[in-house]
Amino acid sequence: MSQGRGWEGAVLKLMRAKDFVLTVTDAEYVTPDYRRVRLTDGGLLAATGVHPTMWVRLWFADGGRPHQRAYTLVDPDPATGTFALEFALHEGRASDWARSVKPGDTIEATVQGTGFEQPDPEPSHLAVIGDPASLPAINSLLDTFGSVPATIWFEGDLDALPARTDPARHDIRQTPRQDAGAHLVEQVRAGLPEVLENTPDAYVWIACDTATTRTLTSYVRKELGIPRQRVHALGYWRAG
């Protein structure tokens, strides 16, 4: 690939990561703080296949140094070789790129580390905990288990965002971000035991900032005793 990637790139190459060049075809603001970018995949989907909550690493130049961030594919279509990426905008190189990008621009992407283990048996209920950064993955999860009811704790304002929720099947519990995620933890601790009590085959999916995700994962596994195979947890970003 064209740009040096330092030790991260070297490690990924040793792990047989696959590299691709994506080309922007369109970009739009969903809200002033949330932007969707559509791209052609440079052969990515044909080479790797598609699975729920699939993500890629994008590479950005940051003062001459490589900088990578992971983003979930939105509506990947292997037949056309296209997908979209959605950015919850804040300060940072990735958000700067999303704000300024235009059709014809390209960006390098690496596929390594993404995966999805299908719960067995299929969930009787989803307990989903996330925020704007993980919304594309939440949407992918809801699409995958379309008929399964879900309780969703969402840290932030979901109303203006492109959430694929259905009031008939999804119980949305929004909470503002307070105390570096501690308020979300309190809300989950107050409500999750009741949700799990009546759903023995529930599946718990957690994707918040790294510290909050770690706290909630420990709570779910150690205090509630949910088996490892019924929990998926991944920190999506680090609080500054």
Image: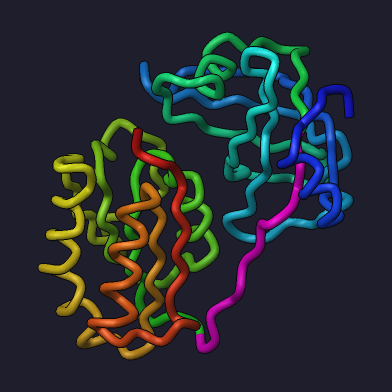
- Magenta: predominant secondary structure element? loop
Which range of residues does the magenta coloring cover? 109-121
Residue 136 falls inside the magenta stretch: no
Q: Is residue 72 left or right of residue 50?
A: left
Where is residue 219 drawn, in percent x and y? 26, 73
Closest to the observer, 159 or 189: 189
Q: What residue do we see at 82% from left, 23% from top? A: 3
Q: What residue do we see at 41% from left, 87% from top? A: 227
For the rendered model, the colour scheme is rainbow
Where is residue 209 drawn, in percent x and y? 37, 47
| The N terminus sits in image quarter | top right
Q: Is residue 50 above or below residue 133?
A: below
Closest to the observer, 102 or 159: 102
The image shows a total of numbered marks equal to: 0
Q: What residue do we see at 67% from left, 40% from top? A: 57
Quadrant of the image occupied by residue 163:
top left
Closest to the observer, 156 or 185: 185
Q: Is residue 42 left or right of residue 29?
A: right
| The C terminus sits in image quarter | top left
Quadrant of the image occupied by residue 42:
top right
Q: What residue do we see at 77% from left, 49% from top? A: 11
